[in-house]
Image (spheres, rainbow, N blue to C red):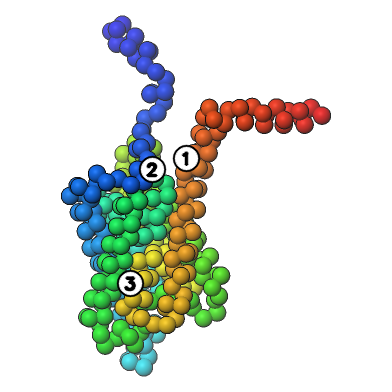
Amino acid sequence: MSKEVEAVTERPAESSAKDYTDPPPAPLVDYEELKQWSFYRAIIAEFTATLLFLYVTIMTVIGYKHQVDLDDGGDVCGGVGILGIAWAFGGMIFILVYCTAGISGGHINPAVTFGLFMARKVSLVRAVLYTVAQCLGAICGVGFVKAFQSAYYNKYGGGVNVIAPGHNKGVALAAESIGTFVLVNTVFSAADPKRNARDSHVPVLAPLPIGFAVFMVHLATIPITGTGINPARSFGAAVIYNGDKAWDEQWIFWVGPLIGAFVAGVYHQFVLRGGAFKALGSSRYKSFACCLVEVLSHFLRS
């Protein structure tokens, strides 16, 4: 018994205080993953998930517009409404993240992939191929919608993201940036290894807050831009519909989400996770910190 107690007391304090392990940063270019079947399986999963996401959500948007079309016998109070559209987007993200999280990470969004790449969670090769797969999946998903709803697809705008009347490009860009910040910040929090180690239920419930984030952002942003926060979603709809306004404003639905994803990555890594304070505590910054403290002390004394 005394030996057991002694072994425990001799254990370094650092290992007992830290009950989780941060994964090492992903290499910028990892050629080894190109030789692994799991890498290509993940790409296929991203393609398929984005295809299904666009198929269900755009079909819901077009179906709703037909249901409220008074010229076609619709009812202005009928259909799923904006609330139903938001549920379609959020619910599909919840389902697809749940299905693909263990295979590809469940990104289904180039902005999410970009944010994770900036935080060194995925390599450059994986980020680029994920983005390509997501965009191709989105194009195919919207293509299926046009094939199945050819009578209504062009009539009701193809589910494209455009700026709503009464709003300018600056407002649209800000709305897309803030909405994507909410989503990507939720993704970072749900995938935080420290929380996963402390609370065993967090990994299981991770798809739920991500889906709710998409749902809530859609409620706020549908009246402004139709809610992009996903460049693949906006790009796929624009490719199939091929309207001038959709292409003229396409840059907003790429620049906005990428800005939001970048800010979310910086906020999570350097504020919530204290990356900046950890860096200041390293040997490279100790001398600078000591000088700063001395200068502040001098001014306070004077």
Q: Residue 44: give x, y in percent of width and height.
A: 21, 59
Visible residue check, residue 209? no
Q: Disc 1 or disc 3, which is closer to the eye?
A: 3
The answer to whether 273 is drawn above or below residue 14 in the figure is below
Type of the residue with mark 2: Asp
Q: Residues within 10 Å of mark 3 (few under 14, many from 20)?
A: many
Residue occupying the point 76% across, 28% down: 298
The answer to whether 13 is drawn above or below residue 192 in the figure is above
Q: Which residue is mark 3?
A: 236
Q: Which residue is mark 1?
A: 273
Q: Residue 122: give x, y in percent of width and height.
A: 34, 48
The answer to whether 164 is drawn above or below residue 20 in the figure is below
Type of the residue with mark 3: Gly
Nearer-N-terminus badge (3/2): 2
Q: Is residue 283 left or right of residue 161?
A: right
Residue occupying the point 37% across, 40% down: 25
Residue 246: image quadrant is bottom left
Q: Which residue is mark 2?
A: 192
Q: Secondary structure at mark 1?
A: loop
Q: Secondary structure at mark 3?
A: helix
> Where the N terminus falls, by quadrant?
top left
Q: Residue 66: give x, y in percent of width and height.
A: 33, 84
Circles 2, 1 touching at the beta carbon (< 8 Å):
yes
Residue 148: image quadrant is bottom left
Structural distance between the alpha carbons of marks 3 and 2: 30 Å
Q: Is residue 44 left or right of residue 207?
A: left
The foreground one among 282 and 10 is: 282
> Where the C terminus falls, by quadrant?
top right
Nearer-N-terminus badge (1/3): 3
Visible residue check, residue 185? yes
The foreground one among 269 and 19 is: 269
